[in-house]
Amino acid sequence: MPELPEVETVARGLHERLPGSTITGVSVYWPRTLARPALDEFTAGLVGRRVESVGRRGKYVIIKLDHGYLLVHLKMSGRLFVAPAGEAPGPHDRAVLDLDDGRQLRFRDARKFGRIYLVDQPEEITAPLGPEPLAADFSLDDFGRLLGRRSGRLKSMLLNQEFLAGVGNIYADEILYVARLNPLRRADTLTACDRARLYEAIHTVLQRAIAACGTTLPDRNYLDAEGRAGEYRVEVYGRDGEPCLACGTPIERLVIGGRSTHFCPKCQQ
DNA sequence: CTAAAATCCTGGTGGC
DNA sequence: TGCCACCAGGATTTTA
């Protein structure tokens, strides 16, 4: 399930091969993939548009056009990639954009959770998102202020996109493990030292994961825009019952806010 | 306010 | 081998 590092990897891959291409046709095979606008307006708004750049905000891929923006949320199983001219369509292709050189930008999504938006400004969609954790202007002081007002559990907070953009279930567990903080801990009980460790862990984990081009779990199917798997190695996620890499204590699993949560009961008091 | 549950979906898994 | 119930998970919506 693509989170910030995976979406960043996809966006970078697309940025290498998409700018300069013009969209010449639109095919949508699963209409609900289009969050907005409806198919007719979507098609009319896209055909003839030229791609200028590809970026990311939170878990959204943002494709800047010469007129408007295409936003894609991959959700659980979405893949966004450029198919060479003549490549046969896949059974889970939900939307396909024809490019003027014969290639196609495809959105493939087995579980149909992913959504595409065509808007004038990306903020129409991304406005509710919290800060970008890796932005240069996201300071420890900012983070401390953000935390101080929250009484929820750390795990739920990290998953809340309005609190911080881009962290999902896997990296929330990895970040709390690196920060040595218990996922059930209430945000407003953190000491200044705790806050600093959490802030640093967010940076460390996300930066390392981006450097590794994301995480592809053994039983998952995340692939980047070039069809490559991520190389990041998780330390706690999905490792319940296996020994903690630091102390050997079996990793435990519990459910917080309906999300599976993995942590070391000894390292993360 | 927090929080949990239901919702959308289907591939994969575990049980029998 | 086949069938089926069930689970995962992001974001949103609903209910407590």
Image: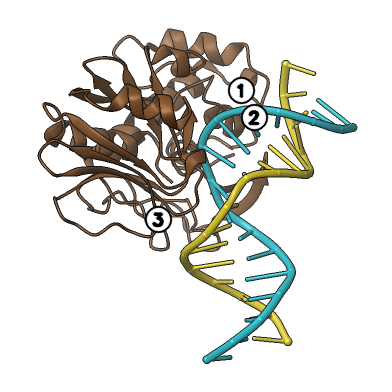
Chain colours: A brown, B yellow, C cyan
- The residue that disc 1 covers is A187
Above or below, A136 relative to A58: above
- Tell me, for residue A153, which label it has, or none: 2
Image quarter for residue A60? top left
Q: Distance between the residues labelled 1 and 2?
A: 6 Å
1 vs 3, front mark = 3
Q: Position of residue A67 (x, y in %)?
A: 26, 14
Image quarter for residue A167? top left
Q: Where is residue A186 in the image (x, y as percent from the top left)?
A: 65, 26
- What chain does badge 2 belong to? A
Q: Where is residue A150 in the image (x, y as percent from the top left)?
A: 63, 17
Q: Are marks 3 and 2 in contact (CB under 8 Å)?
A: no
Q: What residue type is labelled 2?
A: Arg
Image quarter for residue A138? top left
Quarter of the rendering occupied by the C terminus of chain A: top right
Q: Are marks 1 and 2 in contact (CB under 8 Å)?
A: yes
3 vs 2, front mark = 3
State the SS at label 1: helix
* Residue at image location 21% in from the left, 31% down from the top: A23
Q: Which of A63 and A212 is in front in this view?
A: A63
Q: Distance between the residues labelled 3 and 2?
A: 37 Å
Q: What residue type is labelled 3?
A: His
- The residue that disc 3 covers is A92
Q: Which amino acid does label 1 sit on?
A: Ala
Question: Which of the marked residues, 1 or 2, is nearer the chain's N terminus?
Answer: 2
Horizontal arrangement in the rendering, residue A14 relative to residue A206 (left or right): left
* Residue at image location 21% in from the left, 24% down from the top: A48
